[in-house]
Amino acid sequence: MIKEYFCKVVKKVKIRNKILLYLERPMGFDFSPGQFVLFVAETKIGTISRAYSIASTPDENHLIFYISLLSKGAMSTVLKDIRADDELKIRGPFGEVTPEKIGQDLDKIILVGAGSGIAPIRPLAWWYKKHTDVNVTVYHQARYEDELVFMEDFLRWKIDFRGFVSRQPPKNETLKYGYITDDISKIIKPYQNKKIKVVAFGPRGFVEKIKTVVDETILITEGW
Ligand SMILES: Cc1cc2nc3c(=O)[nH]c(=O)nc-3n(C[C@H](O)[C@H](O)[C@H](O)COP(=O)(O)OP(=O)(O)OC[C@H]3O[C@@H](n4cnc5c(N)ncnc54)[C@H](O)[C@@H]3O)c2cc1C
């Protein structure tokens, strides 16, 4: 049975055209890393629902989301106006790009997110680091440095984090100016005869680009 919950908005942080949204986690709401929920809202055009990936780890108290607000987007318009203490209806969780489907008997996992696509990568990276010996690398492709919102968490969890920004040379010297597609093949190469998976989330155009540089037999993608 699909479950439905009303969640109070705890906090909303705006970063350019994106928001970090923190919701109270409903009692008994369990999920696997990589899953998403549907936000449900009543609007002028009727009831709408849209998928958003859960960026929290399963042991955190809040549900965290990282969302790109699209101009004229129906749910984006709802989320643009939402404030702390408002309530949001969610359904779920859903989604199968979880450690169970990806597999755990691996030498290496490369987790790739573009823009808001980093949301499901956060709990997946945490999970592989905490529960397995798999070597984990996280890539985040953003336009600007301040959009690399989970970088500190990945570093705190001692995960090999590679941040790329495309619009402006980064001030932080550990970040790169450009596109991850130029780097990703180099890191895959030493694992050619080993058990490796690449998991990529983000805008459809980005996911299609990843498909041109990573062999489909080791690649799992979810684009939106
Ligand atoms: C499994 C999954 C997970 C996802 N996770 C995330 C996530 O973590 N973060 C995230 O940001 N997104 C995520 N998405 C995408 C998300 O579900 C929505 O598709 C996205 O937020 C857009 O919804 P919207 O209602 O704002 O836009 P929609 O109303 O669906 O509009 C879509 C596009 O059409 C344009 N448009 C709409 N109406 C008009 C109009 N009248 N004139 C001109 N243009 C128009 C909008 O600008 C927009 O570009 C995910 C999607 C999937 C499938």
Image (tube, rainbow, N blue to C red):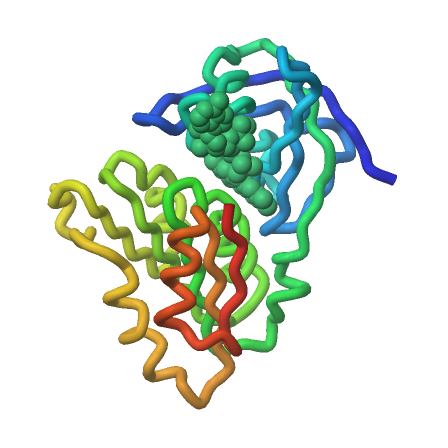
Q: Is residue 206 above or below residue 37?
A: below
Q: Is residue 70 above or below residue 176?
A: above
Q: Position of residue 192 (x, y in %)?
A: 40, 86
* Quadrant of residue 182 within the rendered picture: bottom left
Q: Residue furthest right?
A: 1
As drawn, is 126 to the left or to the right of 158?
Answer: right
As drawn, is 94 to the left or to the right of 176?
Answer: right
Q: How many marks?
A: 0
Q: Residue at x 51, y 71 (%)?
A: 133
Q: Is residue 193 visible?
A: yes
109 and 206: which is toward the camera: 206
52 and 135: which is toward the camera: 52
Q: Residue at x 24, y 56 (%)?
A: 179
Q: Is residue 200 above or below residue 29?
A: below
* Quadrant of residue 187 within the rendered picture: bottom left
Q: Residue at x 49, y 11 (%)?
A: 81
Quadrant of the rendering where the N terminus is positioned: top right
71 and 178: which is toward the camera: 71
Q: Position of residue 90 (x, y in %)?
A: 69, 28
Q: Position of residue 29 (x, y in %)?
A: 74, 35
As drawn, is 15 to the left or to the right of 128?
Answer: left
Q: Residue at x 68, y 64 (%)?
A: 100
Q: Is residue 20 visible?
A: no
Q: Is residue 143 above or below residue 141?
A: above
Q: Residue furthest bottom?
A: 193
